[in-house]
Image (cartoon, rainbow, N blue to C red):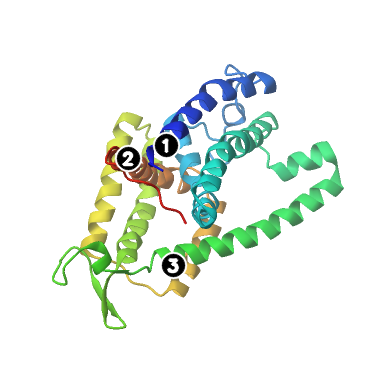
Amino acid sequence: MNILFFLVPSLVLYAFGYRYYSRWLERAWGADPERQTPAVEMQDGLDYVPTQTHVLFAHHFSTVAGAGPIVGPATALIYGALPAWLWIVFGAVFIGAVHDFVCLFASVRNKGRSMAEIARTHLGSTAFVFFILFLLLLIVIVNGVFLQLTATSLTSLHPLGKLNLPPDQTIFDIATVDGELNARIGGIASMSVILITLSAPLLGWAVYKKGMRIALAYPIAAAVAIGSIVAGIYQPVSLDPGVWQTVFSVYILLACGLPVWVILQPRDFVNVQILYTGLLLLVVGLFSAGLQGTEIQAP
């Protein structure tokens, strides 16, 4: 089946979901755009910080594009294209998006508290204890998978032959594995991760403390994203997967403890430029392939 038979209905259904279903959810839950959020009412520069729409969207978009939404549908392709497509489209509209909306709505209406604290307030101490136990188990599982996937991606190798590149190419650093030349794809991503993370506090300081306009922050973030990739091509970083897992464990502890505007939000704002570009190129590529008659093949 031509790949456009999957792409075009997806875009139409997402548009209808965003235009009509989301509006119905807003009315059903009583969303009020004039109502002040806890970030405004209780701003303290630490836990409650008003955030520009573009930065906040980038933060949530980058955060949700994690292991589950990506690895899950990719793995589901072993059952064929249709089940994966149904799960991605209808799962996003009726499950994933609703889940995130309701959780954020409940948090905003309860002074920005976590779901565990909301459960204690409305369901009692027993529900709070069980919720905390569930979250601890979930955090262990998710972080374990996250660390493994991240360490793998940041140390990944790919055969030059499958990239249609000659042995004397100069784009990628080369590693020989079982007599076969491989490009150090992960080394580029590693340098990119390092530079984007180091630049995040500076961008956060400029936006939140110096009032940098978002119109200026966008090109700076794009330049950092592009520059980090170029730097990775010329100076790829090669570390052992175990080292990366240790580094990211420390990073998780620091990022969770520091104010969100110091690392997480500005880092996501930079990283989202890569996501925006990737999505755009994917859609353009799928349309181009579909118009040329490319058919989807899965599994």
For mark 3, what is the residue?
Answer: 152
Looking at the image, residue 133 lies above or below residue 16: below
- Outermost residue, bottom direction? 178
The dot on residue 200 is none
Asked whether, in this view, residue 290 is left or right of residue 52, the answer is left
Q: Which residue is mark 1?
A: 5
Asked whether the viewer can see residue 219, the reply is yes
Q: Secondary structure under badge 3?
A: helix
Give me the residue at 76% from left, 56% from top.
133
Q: Amino acid at mark 3?
A: Thr
Q: Is residue 298 above or below residue 159?
A: above
Look at 46% across and 62% down and name the residue there.
150
Mark 2 or 3, closer to the camera: 2
For the residues labelled 2 and 3, the Cα–Cα distance comes to: 32 Å
* Residue at disc 1, secondary structure: helix
Q: Is residue 143 above or below residue 291?
A: below
State how far apart marks 1 and 3 are (Cα). 33 Å
**Which residue occupies the foreground of this view, 254 or 24?**
24
The residue drawn where x is 31% and y is 61% is 191
Which numbered disc flags the more N-terminal residue, 1 or 3?
1
Determine which residue is flagged by label 2: 290
Q: Position of residue 260 (x, y in %)?
A: 51, 44
Tags 1 and 3 touching, CB below 8 Å: no
Q: Tell me if residue 52 can be seen.
A: no
The alpha-carbon separation of the residues under discs 1 and 2 comes to 9 Å
Going by the numbered disc 1, the residue's amino acid type is: Phe
Q: Residue at x 43, y 45 (%)?
A: 268
Residue 116, horizontal then vertical, whole percent:
73, 45
90 left or right of 137 in image = left
Mark sitting earlier along the chain (2/3): 3
Residue 170 image position (x, y, % from top left): 15, 66
